[in-house]
Image (cartoon, rainbow, N blue to C red):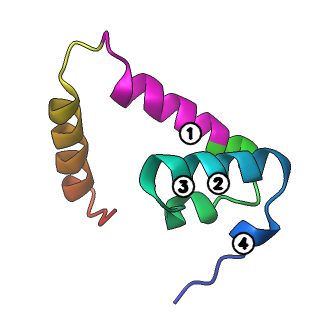
Amino acid sequence: MAWIRIVDEDDAEGLLKRLYDEGRRRAGRVYQILKISSLSPEAIDGYIKMYMTMMIRPSAPLEKAEREMLATVVSQVNDCFY
């Protein structure tokens, strides 16, 4: 089993604390996918901005459910459980 050092929610400061707080507001908790990148909050911030642009933006030609379905299929093809 791999071990990845993370910054715990109680120890987060600055940008990371803001990102953790936003994650908790969105989902009711901070997902592990954010915590494993906690040593690089700038990377998390960039990922979230990219995700919001790709998956949430209202002007996208596909419905959100269609984009989520495509992401699920690609993950399955790539043997990615997440």
Tell whether 59 sits left or right of 1: left
Q: Using the numbered discs, state the Cα–Cα distance from disc 2 to disc 3 in whole angstroms.
A: 6 Å
Work out whether residue 17 or residue 75 is closer to the camera in this orientation and state it.
17
Query: Are the residues tagged 2 and 3 within 8 Å (C-beta)?
Result: yes
Tell me the residue at 62%/64% (across/down).
Answer: 35
Nearer to us of marks 4 and 1 is: 4
Q: Using the numbered discs, state the Cα–Cα distance from disc 4 to disc 3 in whole angstroms.
A: 13 Å
Q: Using the numbered discs, state the Cα–Cα distance from disc 1 to disc 3 in whole angstroms.
A: 16 Å
The residue that mark 2 highlights is 20
**Earlier-in-chain disc, 4 versus 1:** 4
Work out whether residue 45 or residue 4 is closer to the camera in this orientation and state it.
45
Tell whether 56 sits left or right of 52: left
Tell me the residue at 23%/40% (across/down).
Answer: 68
Tell me the residue at 72%/72% (across/down).
Answer: 8
**Earlier-in-chain disc, 4 versus 2:** 4
The residue that mark 1 highlights is 47
State which quarter of the image contains the C terminus. Answer: bottom left
**Earlier-in-chain disc, 1 versus 2:** 2
**Vertical position of residue 24 compared to residue 42: above or below:** below
The residue that mark 4 highlights is 8
The amino acid marked with disc number 3 is: Arg
Magenta region includes residue 58: yes
Work out whether residue 78 or residue 53 is closer to the camera in this orientation and state it.
53
Res. 55 mark: none
The residue that mark 3 highlights is 24
Q: Main secondary structure of the magenta part?
A: helix
Residue 25 image offset from top left, x and y in percent: 52, 48
Tell me the residue at 29%/66% (across/down).
Answer: 81
